[in-house]
Structure formats: structure tokens, C-alpha cells
Amino acid sequence: MTKRALPPVVARMWGRETESRHGPRPSLDLARIVDAAIGIADSEGLAGVRMSSVAARVGMATMSLYRYVGSKDELLTVMADAATPEPPALDGRPWRDYLADWTQANRNFLVDRPWLLSLAHRTPPTGPRTLRWLDRALAALAGTELDLGQRINIASTLTGYAATQASLTHSMITVAAATTSAAGDGSITGLADYGDILGQVLDPEDYPELTAAVRSHAFGTAEKWIDDADFTFGLDLLLDGIQALIARRG
Amino acid sequence: MTKRALPPVVARMWGRETESRHGPRPSLDLARIVDAAIGIADSEGLAGVRMSSVAARVGMATMSLYRYVGSKDELLTVMADAATPEPPALDGRPWRDYLADWTQANRNFLVDRPWLLSLAHRTPPTGPRTLRWLDRALAALAGTELDLGQRINIASTLTGYAATQASLTHSMITVAAATTSAAGDGSITGLADYGDILGQVLDPEDYPELTAAVRSHAFGTAEKWIDDADFTFGLDLLLDGIQALIARRG
DNA sequence: GAGGTACAGCGTACGGAATACACAGTACCG
DNA sequence: CGGTACTGTGTATTCCGTACGCTGTACCTC
């Protein structure tokens, strides 16, 4: 029985705080702090999330936050889970329909909240929301002959795909924050620029295929990355692979 | 002709510095600084990479680094490219063989240098190494009927898969740095613990499938994540999907 | 009901890290 | 041979995260 204490972050995400009976009751709860932090991240990006700014937003002193959160890092971890929406409902749909929906929804909220991408690499999923996504994906595959390991693997692969696509979409769409303020400075501002840059930099001898791609404007249109068509294309690749596997097993 | 100036980072990565003739010659070059930074990241992690520590490592004053790099952020970007190895050689192999190799190699260097994962979300690929990976993947698909957009899409999907798997592998393997130093503290230390935590936290009503997975120890064995079998499983899914697509086109 | 106790909110202070700025020395230019 | 542009660097500023200790309060126990 290796039943150790939960890591404090995890405990907090699940409301497993040991209720204390002494002293004044807290005037806030973790949720309100996390919401404030999420609000800031949405409007100013992750960089705007400072202990001081969050505290100001909830009307407390900076140091008071530490009664609710062990560290800024912890706060970010909790934020990452809380900012994740609920997964779509299964409603008895066939696995392929559902997983397509699931993956797309996954990508969509990552595009809406690009800062979530930067928080993705912290921990394996341990929050209620994130785990619900995993659970639902497993549920969709429940009717198949796949074993549990395979189902988990499929879920992670799809999440990974969603994240990759969201990240690409985001970095391509973004009019990058011009760090140097001079007009016409050298910041990468959009997609057209990306193709430009590659064109300027690539040696055709060394990068023959890429050069060809740039020349035929394969990176040219910004819509390409916002459009669902491209996303769906890759997704279908994955789903086809899964379907073939299931067929083999059945 | 929208031929703007290259972003400074990009210029530096490609050695497109405007050679200056006045003044003393630089006593170092960017490469040595980047190597030092990579060395630190390898041994202490990204957190160990401070302008001061890097400077110490190359035997210069902190502020001297700013003669070679515009900002720490720029340094990290250049590091990310420089730490990427060369892609495997194509050698006329069929696309599927090569891409399997390519993806696996991609995952492997990410597992070796987990800090690269945290730098992945900064920019679309603009460095010589990263772009060479892309070029080689496109080259492998050159014989197929797929159009360029599709080839690029496939390459990103595979990179994404490699990154996802590497990230999972890493977070599972890691004996997490115990931030609190007390023994038996609550940090997530490994895989067994991960299953433990889920078990403690999940409500079977709300997470039926996950609960079942935990109970049957689907998260239980650490080898599962280090082992190639699992990686190859998902990879084959993808490749099958691609193969089906190519067959359809041909 | 009185005192003790543990905990909430918060002001102050410290330490680490990035980086603006100014200055000294140096190599090449005319 | 002065001027100039650039290198290396010390100093100082600014911005954060957070350790610590103090004050007041609500509940518990006697």
C-alpha cells in the first residue's frame, strides 16, 4: 500500500484541502484567484500574470495569495487545468465521430488560449478537467477490441496532434509582439513573412525540397493555417490508422 | 518584392551578420556561447541557464554576452536550433522506412534533451537544423503523388507526435525534482506514483473509464513508457494513415 | 466565559536575474 | 595621426518571487 500524501498542487485542484477550524475564515477561495489569473493570461498573455497583478485583481495584497497557493508555479499548474473546458459529450456516438470532435475541440481551446501551450509540458495530467478529457476519449473507444494501453496511447496521440496544430496555427497567425518598437523592424509578423524569410535564408543546394516548397508558395496563404481543412486532413490520417488497427483486431 | 530585413535572431542563426571592420575583433563567436548554454541546459536544465552562468562558462563578463545576442530570449532560440542534431540520411530509402526512422530519431533527441520541449513553442522553425529536418521529410515524400501542402502537413504531424511522446516519456520517467526538500514530501516522483495519485483522486462515477484503467494498472509499469513498443505502435497508426492516403492518390 | 491557539491578511525586506548605460581600450579607416 | 566604430566590462536600475514576522480574529478547551 503505497498511499502517500498527495502533492499539494493536486490536492488543491481537487479541493482536498484539510479544512481548518481555527482562526478567521478565508475571505476568498482558490477558484477566484485562479479565475483572476486566467483573465489576465487571456488579455495580456502569460507574461502579465504576476503575483502582484493577480493579487491586485482580486483586491488583496500580493503576499496574501500565498495562503491559497504554495508558489506561482503551483498557481500556473492549477490555471492550466481550470482553463481547460469540459470535453464534448459522447452521446453514444461512434468512436470515430466522437474522437474527431474531441480532437478538434481540443485544438480549438488551445488556439483560443495559446498560453495553455506553454503550460503543457509541466506535468502529466492530474487535474479534474484534463483527466475528464482523457476519460471521455477512453469511453469512446470502450466498444472496441483495443486494450487499455492502446486506448491511452491513442488519446495521447490525438492530444499531441491537437497541440501541434494549435501551436502551428498560433505562431503563424500571430502578429508577433514587436519587441523592438521601431517600425519595419525585423520581427516575424505573419505568414507571408515566414515564406519570405525562408526564401532569403535557404541554400537551394542544401535544402532542395524546402526551397521548392517556398517557391511554389506552399507557406503563402494565411488562411491555410486557420482553415480547418488542413487540420482535418491530418486528423483523418490518424483516424484512418486507428480504424485500420481496430479492423485488424476485430 | 517584400524583402524586409531578417529578424536579428534568424540572421544570427545563419551567420548572416554584417561583418564589421572597425574595432577589435570579437574574442569569441556566437557558437561558443551557444555551446556553453547548451552544456548548462544539459547538466542543470533550462533553469540553470542564466546570462551570468553562461558568461562564467565562457570566461566573460555577463554583459559581454549582449555583444553576441540581443537578449536571453534570442539566446534560447538559437540554442534550440543548435541543440537539434542532423536528421538521419535518406539514402534512397522508401518513404515509410525513412519517416519511421526520422520520427524515432526526433523523439530520441527530445528525450535526451527534454529542455528542448520547453523551447518548442516559441517560433515556427527558422534555424538551419530544424529546417533540415523538415527538408528531409519532404524529400522522403518526393516520389509520392501528394501535394506540397500535404507533405508539410505530414511532417508537422510526425514532429508533433515525436514531441508528444517525448514529453510523456520524460514526465513519466523523471524523478521529479523535489522542490520541498523534506523526505517523503508530496512531489510526483515517478510512474507508480502517478497511478497512485489518480487512484486517490478519481471519483469512479465521474471518471469510469479512467478508474478502470488505473485499477488494471494500465499506468503501472515504467518500462511501458521507455519502451519503443508503445511509441512504434502510435507511429504505425500514423504511417498507416499516410500510406492509405498515398494509395488513394496513386 | 476566559484564555490559548492556529490561521487569515499583509508590510517589509531580501535576493536573484535581466538588462540599460556609460566608459575605457583597441584596431582599422582616411 | 586623429577619428571612429566596435569590444569588453563595471555599475546601477528595475522587476519579480517569496521568506519572515506582526496583528488581529474565530474557534476550541477548560
Image (cartoon, coloured by chain):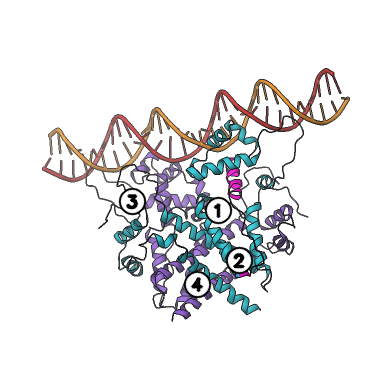
Chain colours: A cyan, B purple, C red, D orange
Q: Tag 1, which chain?
A: A
Q: Residue at x 43, y 43 (%)?
A: B51
Assess whether residue A86 is covered by the magenta stretch.
yes
- Which amino acid type is marked by label 4? Ala
Q: Secondary structure at mark 3?
A: loop
Q: Is residue D6 left or right of residue A35?
A: left
Q: Tag 3, which chain?
A: B
- Which amino acid type is marked by label 3? Pro
Q: Which residue is mark 1?
A: A120
Q: Please state the horizontal and vertical placement of residue B170, each as a whole percent of the image.
A: 58, 58
| Marks 1 and 2, how far apart at CA | 23 Å
Q: Are marks 3 and 4 on the same chain?
A: yes
Q: Which residue is mark 4?
A: B100
Q: Residue at x 59, y 47 (%)?
A: A77
Looking at the image, tell me whether mark 3 or mark 4 is earlier in sequence order.
Answer: 3
For residue A51, which quarter of the picture? top right
Viewer can see residue A204 = yes
User: Camera-side residue: B137 or B79?
Assistant: B137
Q: Secondary structure at mark 1?
A: loop
Q: Are marks 1 and 3 on the same chain?
A: no
Q: Which residue is mark 3?
A: B7
Looking at the image, tell me whether mark 1 or mark 2 is earlier in sequence order.
Answer: 2
* Residues in magenta, as a range: A71-95
- Which amino acid type is marked by label 1? Ala
